Image (spheres, rainbow, N blue to C red):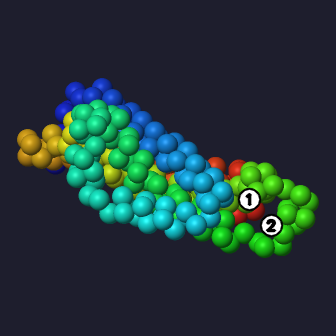
Amino acid sequence: MMDWQWIMDNRATIGALLLDHLQLVGLALLFGTLLTLLFILLTLRWPALSQPLLYLSGLLFTIPSLALFILLMPLTGLSKTTSVIGLTLYSLLILLRNVLTGLSQLPPLVLEAARAQGYTRLFRFFDVELPLVVPALLAGLRIASVTLVGLVTVTALIGQGGLGQLLLTGFTLSFATPIVVSLVLTVVISTVLDGLFVMLGRIAAPWSRT
């Protein structure tokens, strides 16, 4: 049974942990997107790098989250940096694969027309390919955001807050209310973020549904 009084008494703490959770997800998505863009630019210069980069990001994705955080701790300590780096690496496979797949499926006639107009490889990417690949990027962000919202709860195990702290409190005290609050808020965040990226997709790429 829910203890509503406990929720009222701890609403400030719950709000702070919620903001913490959102901050970690937001930073990981931001750095994941920037790292994906960097890797895409590298593959434009050296196309043979695309598969090794996918293999590398896939390998990182297979490392259990807690193990990855422990591996990072000698370098970054018990800090939010450890959490953000780990979460960013987990978003990389989803974002990179989606964007590379989107690029591979662009209409050849459009690319040929751009080449015929004298676009260099870099300008063709930014002026022609990047706008067309926005739906694939947003689809990746939708999946990555939902994945990260769940993964952030693990960062509580290294003392980095987020809604996972409520799970730990609940399990430690054998008290169901904080666990339920954490689960409900996690689902709400996932749903809201997914809806935001759908809306962003309709604005940025109205010709496509993400």
Up/down of 111 relative to 75, above or below? below
Kindly identify the amino acid type of the residue bearing the numbered disc 1: Glu
Disc 1 residue crowd, few under 14, some 14–19, many 20+, Cα 10 Å: some
Q: Which mark is residue 129?
A: 1
Give how far across and how far down residue 88 sits, in percent: 42, 47
Q: Position of residue 89 (x, y in %)?
A: 41, 51
Q: Is residue 35 left or right of residue 114?
A: left
Q: CA distance from mark 2 to mark 1?
A: 8 Å
Query: In the figure, residue 138 lies in which quadrant?
Result: bottom right
Near-viewer residue (52 or 158): 52
Element at label 1: helix
The residue depicted at 38 percent of the width and 43 percent of the height is: 85
- Find the residue positioned furthest to the right: 117
The quarter of the picture where the C terminus appears is bottom right
| Residue drawn 39% across the image and 54% down it | 90
Q: Position of residue 157 (x, y in %)?
A: 20, 43
Name the residue at 44% across, 44% down.
Answer: 28
Most extreme residue toward the left is: 173
Residue 188: x percent and y percent? 41, 49
Image quadrant in which you'd find residue 177: top left
User: Would residue 112 be found to the left or right of residue 38 on screen?
Assistant: right
Question: Which residue carries the number 2 mark?
Answer: 111
Of 201 and 13, nearer the camera is 201
Q: Nearer the viewer, residue 85 or 53?
A: 53
The answer to whether any part of residue 172 appears in the image is yes
Residue 83 vs 184, above or below: the answer is: above
The answer to whether mark 2 and mark 1 are in CB contact below 8 A is yes
